[in-house]
Image: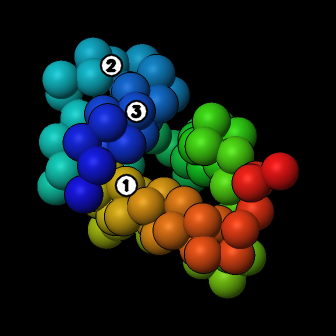
Amino acid sequence: MNDTIQQQVFEIIAKQAKIEPDAVKPESTLKDLGVASLEAIELIFDIEEHFNINFPEQQGANFDSDTAQSLVDAVQEALNDKAATGEGSK
């Protein structure tokens, strides 16, 4: 796992939650961090824009149980898929 990806995702979460990045832990849920469901949708858009990726439509987040680490994993998976398909290598 790329620590810089985790760090970047945690910083985006912290900005949305209006907390310090150090407060975001891998096991933290968005709900634990005070991110409401509407804010979480904006958070997903921010992450997609930051990494120039798109999460699959069917990948709905469960804000009560999904952790910050699960978002990091989803970003890594999307980046891997993007690299495998050769997107962005123009």
Q: Which three-letter amino acid code belongs to the residue tagged 1?
A: Val
Say which residue appears at 68% left-offset and 55% top-offset.
Answer: 53
Q: What is the spatial separation of the Cα atoms under label 1 and label 2, in whole angstroms? A: 18 Å
Give percent across and percent down for residue 10: 34, 35
Q: Nearer the viewer, residue 89 or 51?
A: 89
| Label 3 with label 2: CB-CB less than 8 Å | no
Vertical arrangement, residue 24 with respect to residue 26, above or below: above
Residue, far right: 90
Q: Secondary structure at mark 3?
A: helix
Q: What is the spatial separation of the Cα atoms under label 3 and label 1, in whole angstroms? A: 9 Å
Quadrant (top left/top right/bottom left/bottom right) for the N terminus: bottom left
Report the disc number at residue 41. none
* Residue, disc 1: 72
Q: Which class describes the residues within 10 Å of circle 1: few (<14), some (14-19), or many (20+)?
A: many
Which marked residue is nearer to the observer: mark 3 or mark 2? Answer: 3
Q: What is the spatial separation of the Cα atoms under label 3 and label 2, in whole angstroms? A: 14 Å
Q: Which three-letter amino acid code belongs to the residue tagged 3?
A: Gln
Report the disc number at residue 8. 3
| 70 with respect to 25 (left or right) | right
| 58 with respect to 25 (left or right) | right
Say which residue appears at 70% left-offset and 40% top-offset.
Answer: 49
Give percent across and percent down for residue 17: 43, 28
* Residue, disc 2: 19
* 3 or 1: tag closer to the N-terminus: 3
Q: Which class describes the residues within 10 Å of circle 3: few (<14), some (14-19), or many (20+)?
A: some
Say which residue appears at 17% left-offset and 42% top-offset.
Answer: 25
In which quadrant of the rendered view does residue 67 lie?
bottom left
Give percent across and percent down for residue 79: 54, 61
Q: Secondary structure at mark 2?
A: loop
